Amino acid sequence: MDAVYAGTFDPLTYGHLDVIERGARICDRLVVAVSESRNKCPTFPLGKRIGMVREATRHISNVEVEGFSGLLVEYLRKKGIKVVIRGLRALSDFEYEFQLALMNKKLDPEVETIFLVTRADRSFVSSKIVKEIFSYGGSVSDLVPEVVVQYMKEYFNKDKWGVF
């Protein structure tokens, strides 16, 4: 079975990586689709986010990483994939993810969504929180892969984002 794990990954966290690693174990091929997400106004440009995810998942042989824009169901059609993997951190995630799954099903009745519950020790981590901690000079090294820390240090002006 092939599947897609789509997200903004702005930036990639250990919670995302946990879902990718576990998703890759149950799939023949897992495509990590990095969304342009113009509505979310991501901090990192699409190319940087794709680079982060590629480097952080290099150790997983059946993972492919690419960017996309537009509707996920259109991307799935283009790839010929019918399965979406989504990660859940908390009950509040479920309501939103459930709505997305139902809308994807309405747009394409053949699309199936598999939910993977994030490990408890990663359930509080979000990209937004990571960026906020980093912006005040806090360490995020236990929340994101080292490659992401390096991208963040290189991308942001150190004077603006705190001392490392």
Image (tube, grey):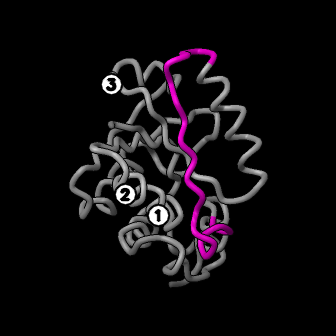
Residue positioned 30% across, 54% down in the render: 54
Amino acid of disc 2: Met
Please tell me whether mark 3 sits on a helix, a strand or a loop: helix
Residue positioned 46% across, 64% down in the render: 18
Q: Which residue is denoted by mark 2 in the rendering?
A: 52
Tell me the distance, in whole angstroms, between the alpha carbons under discs 2 and 1: 15 Å
Amino acid of disc 1: Asp
**Where does the N terminus fall, quadrant-wise?**
top left
Q: Which residue is denoted by mark 3 in the rendering?
A: 79
Above-or-below relation of 27 to 59? above
In this image, 47 relative to 132: left or right?
left
Q: Counting residues from the N terminus, which is met first, the one under dot 3 or under dot 2? A: 2
Please tell me whether mark 1 sits on a helix, a strand or a loop: helix
The mark lying in front, picked from 3 and 2, is 3
CA neighbours of label 1 inside 10 A, class few (<14), some (14 to 19), many (20+): some
Amino acid of disc 3: Lys
Image spot of residue 37 (x, y percent) = 55, 36
Q: Which of the 4 quarters of the picture holds residue 97?
A: top right
Above-or-below relation of 40 to 163? above
Please tell me whether mark 2 sits on a helix, a strand or a loop: helix
Q: Which residues are magenta?
A: 106-125
Above-or-below relation of 86 to 148? above
Image spot of residue 60 (x, y percent) = 26, 59
In this image, 75 relative to 135: left or right?
left
